[in-house]
Image (cartoon, rainbow, N blue to C red):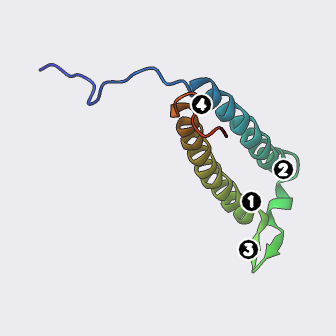
Amino acid sequence: MLHEPAAASKHDPATPYKMRLGAWMFWFYLIIYAGFIAVNIVSPLTMEKIVVMDLNLAVVYGFGLIIVALLQALIYDFACNAKEIELAKPAGEGEAK
């Protein structure tokens, strides 16, 4: 059985933008995640402290990591779609005459 791509792919002029944005978002998230790991290594008892609504820091920080990841995914999708639309316009379109 021959497996081929479901759809033909072509050159995406937004690829450099997408790669740069993805790299920045990765490093941003890595810093936040490294903070979570650092607190667990350096002061694990800090994670037991209640911070909001009877939830400890570990739970709040963990949910924060999930929320940040979801927000980053939405921002990335919106930014990449906008860039694709911008680059798909023919030259000269949208300029004042």
Q: Earlier in the sequence, mark 3 or mark 4?
A: 3
* Amino acid type for the residue under numbered disc 2: Val
Find numbered disc 2 in the image and state the secondary structure of the residue it sits on. Answer: helix
Question: Mark 3 or mark 4, which is nearer to you?
Answer: 4
User: At x 54% / y 42%, what residue is drawn?
Assistant: 81
The residue depicted at 28 percent of the width and 25 percent of the height is 5
Q: Nearer the viewer, mark 3 or mark 1?
A: 1
- Check disc 2 and report the residue beneath it: 39
What numbered label is drawn on residue 92?
4
Measure how far apart labels 1 and 2 are at the Cα level.
Answer: 10 Å
Front-lying residue, 44 or 19: 19
Q: Residue furthest left?
A: 1
Q: Position of residue 14 (x, y in %)?
A: 57, 28
Position of residue 15 relative to residue 76, above or below, is above
- Sequence-wise first label, 1 or 2: 2
Q: CA distance from mark 3 to mark 4?
A: 55 Å
Q: What's under tag 3, amino acid-wise?
A: Leu
Residue tagged 1: 61
- Tell me the tag on residue 55: 3
For label 4, the SS is loop
